[in-house]
Image: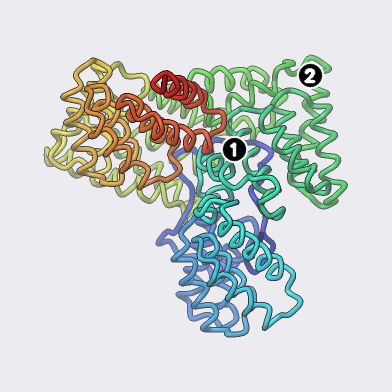
Amino acid sequence: MTRTKARALGLLSTAAVLALPLFGTVSASAQTQSYEDLKNLCNSDDSTDDQTIFGCNGVIASKAGRRDLATAYNNRGYAYDNKAQYDRAIQDYSEAIRIDPKYALAFNNRGFAYQNKGDYVRAVQNYDQALKIQPNYKKALDNRASALVIRDAQAKGDLPQNYGELRAMCNSNASNDDQTIAGCNGIIVPGKTPPDDLVPAYNNRGYAYNNKSQYDQAIRDYSEAIRLRPDYALAFNNRGLSYQNKGDYARAIEDFDQAIKFRPNYQKAIDNRARAVKVRAEQASGGLPTNFGQLKAMCNSDASTDDQTIEGCNGVIAAAANVSAGDMAITYNNRGYAYNRKADYDRAIGDYSEAIRLKPDYALAFNNRGISYQNKSDFNRALEDFEQALRIQPEYQKATENRAEAVKLREATAIGDIPQNYGQLRALCNSNASTDDQTIEGCSGVITAVRAPQDDLTKAFYNRGIAYNNKGDSDKALLDYDQAINHKPDYVIAYNNRGLIYSRKGQQDRAIMDYDQAVRINPNYALAYNNRGLAYFRKGDYDRAIENYDRAIKLNPDYLRAIENRADAVKRKAQAGR
């Protein structure tokens, strides 16, 4: 099933280096660029979703001609669709259609956005309109057929009613790895799911497992995608990367060769093959350690702990003579990120500085170094780094937000509304390296500051609640979770954690109310279903317990705790029936 920009669509793919997307991505900035630069950002395949939005915003604001304007609205809608902001996507597609009523592509894309919302009637209407304008429009034909199959399967109960949302989670660039896995799990129903959905679902789930360093599971999913679509170059490339991460360069090269066979101009696969050949040769000559692939994966993976990231990056740095400057810059950035999380700010700053020396236009490293300076309460240097990040990458939204926050904190510090050591207090509050007492000390300092940012307050109450709970002070933990939820009413994990405390206190009904709220906010939150099942189990309601464990396992088939809990509930139900 496909939606399209005014250019070709690529499903989730993996770059040659899975660098950590630390501290955010890119979006709009007030700095001006030429119309052609903005238009290129709006239309380019290489733009991120936020870069697309930034570029299209500029085109739309510049009194462009009707053709450029319609294209800009379509492309911005495509980016919003990728970010799972379907209503905004539909608004943009509708505006593109208003400007150009014969714009078949925009009708197709609007149909896809409606389909992601689960509105198959409107989806089919839009595909019909696209086909009325362009009768041989294959993508619209395929999308229409898939929409009808899904609608009929839902009516029979063969596919879940929230299939559209699950599919969107599976395919969206805005999903994190766990959301991608949960979404793909929900739509992978062999024999029922349309092939056009099933193939990318296996690829995308494999991509998420690869990010989580679960390479064997990733390879199994990529292999299934390839079995279903033997010419799927993207899955061959991605499977090659997983083999490379396991240090199996022979199989990696075989897969990159297959990807290039099916797509001769597939630049990522060409680059990945060249890199794999080089690493294999360096290993053979003793220039790189035999476990270099695993070390690099540890350094780059979101699933690594801070210590694992540091260990992996250390291994890459030890082989620096045989590693490209670009890869070394990423390595130092990632190790700096881990040191920052461990509250070792000076070492973090040293690593970010080395990343910048190797790659002077590395906006991400400037932004990250700014955060470390801010954690040291050095707001002037933090501002300098955020500004440099924005000079390099004017549409870098996270750097824009960080700069604004640093300005506020500097001003509040100057007039005494927050303490001079606010940065250190916030870092103590948020760092994984803090003890429970240090977390409480840091978070209390943030909470008592007169002008602490709202987001800081929310995190401070939540983190202090965890620390109090760890220390066995559940009453104080409950009060802090209450405050976190007051500041952020859709704080899913705070509802879950508060429910856990109520359940341990024997207040199962109050716990269930919190879990109910958690799954209302996030219907794919497997942990909350498991915990709600446990609360029902403690009430002796084994049928509802099993029902909730089933929901958790469906969302995460590898959820061992839920599987064990379900077995206990089945056993207890049988005993109760004797």
Residue labelled with disc 2? 283
Q: Quadrant of the N terminus?
A: bottom right
Q: Which residue sits at x=28%, y=18%?
A: 470
Q: Quadrant of residue 248?
A: top right
Residue 273, position as x, y percentages in the image:
80, 37
98 or 295: nearer the viewer: 98
Q: Quadrant of residue 381?
A: top left
| Crowding at mark 2 (Cα within 10 Å: few <14, some 14-19, many 20+) | some
Q: Quadrant of residue 411?
A: top left
Q: Is residue 553 above or below residue 93?
A: above
Task: Name the outermost residue toward the front.
Answer: 578
- Horizontally, residue 341 falls left or right of residue 74, namely left
Q: Which residue sits at x=52%, y=68%?
A: 56
| Crowding at mark 1 (Cα within 10 Å: few <14, some 14-19, many 20+) | many
Q: Amino acid at mark 1?
A: Ala
98 or 32: nearer the viewer: 98
Task: Name the outermost residue toward the right.
Answer: 261
Q: Quadrant of the C terminus?
A: top left
Residue labelled with disc 1? 208
